Image (tube, rainbow, N blue to C red):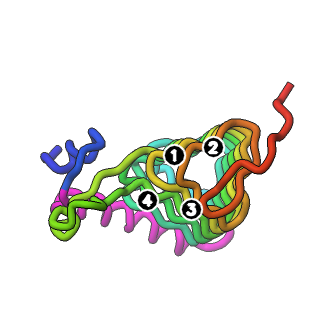
C-alpha cells in the first residue's frame, strides 16, 4: 500500500495518486457490471456488489443505478435496502446496519476538503471521515449525509434533509440542516 493510501486509511489528509485512481477504476468496472445487468439478473448483480463491497449482508438489496467511490469501505447490513440513484462516497468507512432503508438519490459523503487553507485545497488535499447508519434507520429520498456523521438506530431522516451532525436513536430529523423534530417509540 502506498503512502497516500495509508494516509487515507488512517483518516489523515492525503493527495490523490495513481494507486487510488486505479482502485476507483476497479470499483467503477464492477459497478458498470452491476448497473448494466439485466433487470432479472439478481445473481449477477449480487456477485458484482459482493466483489466491490467490503461486506454485503444477506438479503441486502441495492437498486441500480448506483455509484460509490471505492466500494471496499462499504459494509451493508443484512436486509438493508438502497434505492436507485444513491451515491456512497466511501473514501472512509460507510457502515450501514441491518434493515436500513435508504431512499432514491441519497448521498453519503465521507470526503472533506480544506476550508481555510486555500493553497492546500487548490493542491487537492482531502481527508475522509466515516459515516455510520444504525440498524433499522430510514433515510428519505435525496438525503445528504456529511462526513463523520452517525445516524442512530430506528432514526428517520426526512426527504431532502442535509445531515451535518449526529442523529440520535429513535428520532425523526428533517431539514437543512437536519434537526430533531420528534422522538419515536423505543423498541421493546
**Residue at the spot 71% in from the left edge and 61% down from the top edge:** 140
Compare marks 2 and 1 and give the one earlier in the sequence. Answer: 1
Does the CB distance between marks 2 and 1 fall below 8 Å?
A: yes
Q: Which residue is mark 4?
A: 89
Q: Earlier in the sequence, mark 4 or mark 3?
A: 4
> Mark 2 and 3 residues: CB-CB less than 8 Å, in contact?
no
The location of residue 2, given as percent across then percent down, is 14, 47
* Residue located beneath label 3 in the image: 144
- Cα–Cα span, label 1 and label 4: 13 Å
Disc number placed over residue 167 in the picture, else none: 2
Looking at the image, is mark 1 or mark 4 earlier in the sequence?
4
Horizontally, is 179 left or right of 8 in the view?
Answer: right
Circle 1 residue? 149
Residues rendered magenta in the picture: 15-41
Q: Quadrant of residue 105?
A: bottom right
Q: Are marks 4 and 3 in contact (CB under 8 Å)?
A: no
Q: Nearer the viewer, mark 4 or mark 2?
A: 2
Q: In the current view of this chain or complex, which residue is farthest to the front? A: 116
Amino acid at each position: 500500500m502506498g503512502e497516500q493510501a495509508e494516509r487515507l486509511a488512517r483518516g489523515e489528509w492525503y493527495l490523490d495518486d495513481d494507486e487510488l485512481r486505479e482502485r476507483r477504476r476497479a470499483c467503477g468496472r464492477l459497478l458498470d457490471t452491476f448497473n448494466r445487468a439485466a433487470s432479472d439478473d439478481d445473481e449477477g448483480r449480487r456477485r458484482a456488489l459482493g466483489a466491490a463491497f467490503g461486506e454485503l449482508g444477506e438479503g441486502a438489496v441495492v437498486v441500480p443505478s448506483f455509484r460509490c467511490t471505492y466500494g471496499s469501505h462499504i459494509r451493508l447490513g443484512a436486509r438493508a435496502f438502497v434505492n436507485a440513484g444513491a451515491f456512497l462516497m466511501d473514501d472512509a468507512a460507510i457502515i450501514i446496519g441491518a434493515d436500513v432503508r435508504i431512499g432514491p438519490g441519497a448521498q453519503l459523503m465521507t470526503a472533506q476538503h480544506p476550508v481555510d487553507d486555500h493553497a492546500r485545497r487548490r493542491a487537492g488535499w482531502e481527508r475522509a471521515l466515516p459515516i455510520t447508519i444504525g440498524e433499522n434507520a430510514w433515510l428519505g429520498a435525496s438525503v445528504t449525509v456529511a462526513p463523520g456523521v452517525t445516524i442512530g438506530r430506528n432514526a428517520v431522516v426526512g426527504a431532502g434533509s442535509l445531515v451535518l451532525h449526529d442523529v440520535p436513536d429513535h428520532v425523526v430529523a428533517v431539514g437543512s440542516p437536519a434537526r430533531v423534530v420528534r422522538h419515536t417509540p423505543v423498541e421493546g
